[in-house]
Image: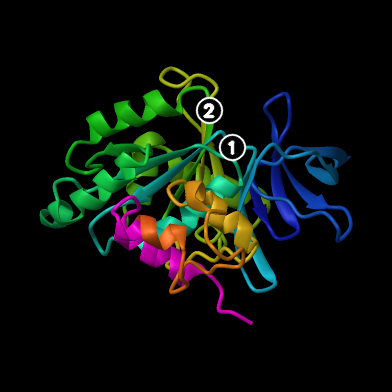
Amino acid sequence: MVAAYGRRCLVELDDGRRLPAMLRGRSIEVCVGDRVDAAEADTNQLVVEHLLPRRTLIQRSVAHRRKLLAANVDLAVILVGPSPRYAEDILLRVMLAVRHADVPVLIVANKTDHPAFEAIRDRIGVLRGLGEQVLEVSVRGEPERTREALLERLDGRTSVLLGESGMGKSSLLNLLVPEAAQRVNDISQALGSGRHTTTASLLFALDAVHSRDAAVIDTPGFQQFGIAHLSESERDHAFVDIAPYLGQCRFHNCRHDREPGCRVRAAAQAGEIDPLRYRLYVELRPAPA
């Protein structure tokens, strides 16, 4: 699945052809990266009959609504930077959703040449200290170095680009896929509409000379990232630094905030858990009923 806009999508066949398709029935919900069974309705149109099992699925959600971002990916590339802001609470939510999907993470810290980058360097260090893969780049200042460093990590994988609006994701995509704008136009023409191209995910094959069997899925930028589809337990255990302390509190229903005998809070006070991450963790927990 190369593109999906509601009931319409663009499917790449085994022979390399890309044809527009419609979904059969209301029960099928697809996203970019999905594998499907499709039948030819005519020479230029497919009908998607079945959705094949997914290896992975990354999504965001609020209340009873969800947005599927990408399926069957091998790597999530999360773009952060000092401008327009470094929002660790949103980064944390994205990472929790990706961890829940069991997808490896690469954090790309962009705009290293920005004057405000030094202000976030300590936070980048905290992520590295947790064992996260972090790559510091300047997409505009050092484009060739950035491109080579990314292609090396994307080689042989289907990756998804995730990031807040304004972090340089479009610039990074254009660096990796110089003809991206033309490919978007081609997809829009194939589907008969271009108005959704900035609000939906799109798959791009990378240059085979530099990255073998590699593709990247671009997703719309966001300002918030809901994780309503994660249960409280799933959120808790997706915190790699907090999960080891769970189950060690005095009370089995401890909320890890003010309760006596809380092992998680004690670890934070002792410096075993980063103070900001602990505060964000407490804030993410739902209010008691």
> Magenta stretch containing residue 281, yes or no?
yes
For marks 1 and 2 on the same chain, the one whose residue lies earlier in the sequence: 1
- Place of residue 195 in the rendered image (x, y in percent of width and height, measured from the top left): 56, 63
> Magenta stretch containing residue 210, yes or no?
no
Amino acid type for the residue under numbered disc 2:
Arg
- Place of residue 113 in the rendered image (x, y in percent of width and height, measured from the top left): 14, 46
Q: CA distance from mark 1 to mark 2?
A: 8 Å
- Place of residue 39 in the rendered image (x, y in percent of width and height, measured from the top left): 87, 39
For this view, does 35 lie left or right of residue 181?
right
Among the 4 quarters of the image, the one containing residue 289: bottom right
Q: Secondary structure at mark 2?
A: loop
Q: Is residue 151 visible?
A: yes
Task: Point out which mark residue 32 bears.
Answer: none
Q: Which residue is mark 2?
A: 157
Tell me which colouring the rendered structure shows: rainbow
Q: Which residues are magenta?
A: 268-289
Who is closer to the viewer here, 219 or 99? 99
Q: At x 48% / y 51%, what residue is drawn?
A: 245
Above/below status of 218 relative to 199: above
Q: Residue furthest bottom?
A: 289
Q: At x 28% / y 53%, what residue is drawn?
A: 271
Q: Secondary structure at mark 1?
A: loop
Q: At x 46% / y 52%, what residue is drawn?
A: 242
Which part of the image, by quadrant, shows the N terminus?
top right
Marks 1,2: beta carbons within 8 A: yes
Q: Which residue is mark 1?
A: 73
Q: Is residue 164 visible?
A: no
